[in-house]
Structure formats: C-alpha cells, structure tokens
C-alpha cells in the first residue's frame, strides 16, 4: 500500500469514528462528554503538529529544483499551503516558520512540544514570533529559560488551564521587558522615530487614513475608540432609535474619530493656520442656495479635496467652528465669508453650555463639551447668531436635524428648545 493510499484510508476511518462520536454525544453522560472532548483536543493538536512537520518536509526535503514546492509547480512552500490546504497567507507563512523551527530547533523545548502535539499551532506561532523578535538582544541562558517556561504555560497542568495565545504573548513580552528594561527604553525611542500618519483621497472622494503610533499614544487612541465603539454604545441615543442602533463597530469608530478631530480643531491648544484654528472652507454658489431654498438638489464644494457634497450636508457641518462657508457668485467670486458673523463666540458657547449642558435631543446624554452649536433658524436662511437662536446638538442628532428626521420645538414650561422625532404623515 502506498503512503498516499494509507493516508486516505486513515482519513476515512477517522471520519467514521468521528461520525459515531458525534452521534453518541447528545445521549452520553457528562463524564463521557469530557472524555470525548479530551480525545478531540488531542486529535486536533496532533493534526496541527502533522501540518507543521509537513511544512518542514516541504521546505527541507531533497528536491530537483530549489524546493519541493517548486518541483510541484508552486512558487514557494507558503504558496503551496495556501492553495492546497486553504491557509491565508499569514497562516501559511507561520507554518513555514514552524517547519524551519522543527528543522533547526532554535527553541528545542518548543520544537518538541510541537512534534508531540501538546500545544496548539497558534500558541507555538505566538511563542516563536515573540522569541524571534527579541532573540538577538538576549543571551542563550535566558532564551532557554523562556523556552521552557512558555511551553509549560502553553501546555497547562493538572491545576491550571493552558494559557491562551494572548496571555502567552503578554507574559513573554513582560519577561523580556523585566529582564532588560534598557531594551524597553531603546524600543520606545525607536517607536517614536518610526511614528507616522498618512492620509489620501480615494477616487470616490472618501478619505483614507493610516497611522503608526508608539505604544502609549496608540493605546490611548484605542482606549478612546473602544469606549465609543463598544457594542452597547449608542452615543446615548434614545432607546429604540433605529438610525443609530444599526451602526457597526467600525462605523462607530469612524464617528468617534471624526468627533475627536472636530473637537480638537476648535481647541485653543490646536495648531493654527494663518493665525486661526484649522478651518475647512466650503464654498456654496448663490444659485445652489436658491436651489436648496426651493427644495431641489443643490451642491457645495469642499476646498481641501475639491469634492462636491450636498448643500444639506454642508449646512450641517458649517454650523460649528471647524468649518467656514464662503458664498460665491456664478463666477466663483466670494460674496460673503460667513465665519465672523456666523459662528457663536466662545462666550456665547459658554452660555449655551449652561442652558444646554447636554445634547438637546430627548433622551440623549452627550455632554455639552462634545456638542455642536446649531442655528435654530439656519444661518443660510437669515438666522442670527444669538443665544435665543442657538441650541447644542451632538454630531449625530445635528445631522438628523439637517436631514429633517428631527424637528426643533420650544418647551412651553422652560422656554428651551429641544429636538424630537419628526413624524411624517
């Protein structure tokens, strides 16, 4: 019997055993279920060990060309694993690394554990990745100790569960940091030198951002985004508000990022441009204002990217101090630059914050520091920048007002304005 035939037969026999085990699982006792669980775990770990050894053979067996993979008409071992096993590229690369570890045994305890199937491939990949990242900075004795300890925690014991890949990663990093704190200082300096942020406009006008941040600053950003993108976070909107409860986590993170930038742009600590806070300019031709007033589609233009946006969207974003509107004639000549007479002054904002300590939408608890000052009678429709014409709205509900999903009404008892759901009949 050939090796390939033997493997096929073994696979068929294993499938039959599993089918019987799964069929019995619903009716067997708790003790028998634990036994099945243990057996399944051991089988899964052994299967992962076989895959690592398979990667070792593919990478290091004698070949006609430079590798077995190329003999079999693949560009590399990782490429073979991607196509034949269905691995993602990163997973295929990781198995190739495990195969090299089994061949060269840089971390002998880890290599033995992989072959024995006593730890998972995910645990092994985390360990070898962390060791590879630090090995040039530490002596052989410390690496040998870390090798033994990491495998012991990954395997678990009678009194403790095997450590998860995340716990292993954090612990290994802690061992290296405590053993050589000077290396941590060096890495911190290197991270500061590597920090970067890039932004570009896509073909459809959307803006992409990419940032690489040092560990503490990056963690602070993650903390902020996590707080604003948690599954239960709804920007404190009223319960049952479908427009905001349907947001995905990534949409929540995008909204939080925009809110952070627009708030920072209005801060006295922000860098200035031409002596003023960084201010986005939106140009609106008079003919488009006329269209907008007549209720027909109308366009404004964002100066920074030269993208067109609906005037209704422009009306929303220019209500606050991070955006400035320029009304032009049909030839592009500026007729009115609205910032000086449009924006609520810092003193007026303080007064509004006293009158509206949170978003003025029923049920919303976003504090005033995160809100935007909105003209109750739109500035573009002749509304004045007076306290009696101002109201605090969070970014989301500000948008809803301009979309006419919310309406503004005055409370007869308090004489304060509030935003409520606009029910259309």
Image (cartoon, grey):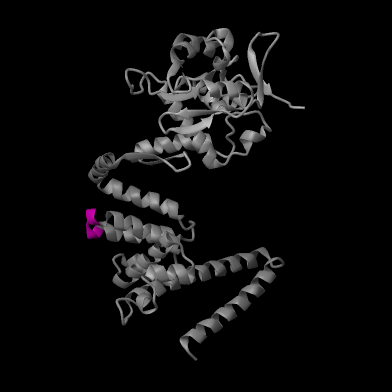
Task: Tell me what residue is drawn at x 48 percent, y 84 percent.
Answer: 4
Q: Which residues are magenta?
A: 136-141
Q: Residue extending furthest front?
A: 331
- Residue 336 highlighted magenta (yes or no): no
Tell me, yes or no, whether the highlighted magenta stretch contains residue 138.
Answer: yes
Residue 23 or residue 242, whichever sits in front? 242
Taking depth in this image into account, of 89 and 286 the one nearest to the observer is 286
Q: Residue at x 58, y 21 (%)?
A: 290
* Residue 224 image position (x, y, % from top left): 46, 34
User: Residue at 51% of width from left, 82% of height from top?
Assistant: 7
Q: Is residue 248 left or right of residue 72?
A: right
Q: Quadrant of residue 337?
A: top left
Q: Which residue is at 26% across, 44% downward?
A: 187
The image position of residue 142, as x and y in percent, is 26, 56
Q: Quadrant of the C terminus?
A: top right
* Main secondary structure type of the part rendered in magenta: helix
**Vertical side of 156 occupied by 46: above or below:** below
The residue lying furthest to the bottom in this view is 1
Q: Nearer the viewer, residue 138 or 397?
A: 397
The quarter of the displayed image where residue 110 is located: bottom left
């Amino acid at each position: 019997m050939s090796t390939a035939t033997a493997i096929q037969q073994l696979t068929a026999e294993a499938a039959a055993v599993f089918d019987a085990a799964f069929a019995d699982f619903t009716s067997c006792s708790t003790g028998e279920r634990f036994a099945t669980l243990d057996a399944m775990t051991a089988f899964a770990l052994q299967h992962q060990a076989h895959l690592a050894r398979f990667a070792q053979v593919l990478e290091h067996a004698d070949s006609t060309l430079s590798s077995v993979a190329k003999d079999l008409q693949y560009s590399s071992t990782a490429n073979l694993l991607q196509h034949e096993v269905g691995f993602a590229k990163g997973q295929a690369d990781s198995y190739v690394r495990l195969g090299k570890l089994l061949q060269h045994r840089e971390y002998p305890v880890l290599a033995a554990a992989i072959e024995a199937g006593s730890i998972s491939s995910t645990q092994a990949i985390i360990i070898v990745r962390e060791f590879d990242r630090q090995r040039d900075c530490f002596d052989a004795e410390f690496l040998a100790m870390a090798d033994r300890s990491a495998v012991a925690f990954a395997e678990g014991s009678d009194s403790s569960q095997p450590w998860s890949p995340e716990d292993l990663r954090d612990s290994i990093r802690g061992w290296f940091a405590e053993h050589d704190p000077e290396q941590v200082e060096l890495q911190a300096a290197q991270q500061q030198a590597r920090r970067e942020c890039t932004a570009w406009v896509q073909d459809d006008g959307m803006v992409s951002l990419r940032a690489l941040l040092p560990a503490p600053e990056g963690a602070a950003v993650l903390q902020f985004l996590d707080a604003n993108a948690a599954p239960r976070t709804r920007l404190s909107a009223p319960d049952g508000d479908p427009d905001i409860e349907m947001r995905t986590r990534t949409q929540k993170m995008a909204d939080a990022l925009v809110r952070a930038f627009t708030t920072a742009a209005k801060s006295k600590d922000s860098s200035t441009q031409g002596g003023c806070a960084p201010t986005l300019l939106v140009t609106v031709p008079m003919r488009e204002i006329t269209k907008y007033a007549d209720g027909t589609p109308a366009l404004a233009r964002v100066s920074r990217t030269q993208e067109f946006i609906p005037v209704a969207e422009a009306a929303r974003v220019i209500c606050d101090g991070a955006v400035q509107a320029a009304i032009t004639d049909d030839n592009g000549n500026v007729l009115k630059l609205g910032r000086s007479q449009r924006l609520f002054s810092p003193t007026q904002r303080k007064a509004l914050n006293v009158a509206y300590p949170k978003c003025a939408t029923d049920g919303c608890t976003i504090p005033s520091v995160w809100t935007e000052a909105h003209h109750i009678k739109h500035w573009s429709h002749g509304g004045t920048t007076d306290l009696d014409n101002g109201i605090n709205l969070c970014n989301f509900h500000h948008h809803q007002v301009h979309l006419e999903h919310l309406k503004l009404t005055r409370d007869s008892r308090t004489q304060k304005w509030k935003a409520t759901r606009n029910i259309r009949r």
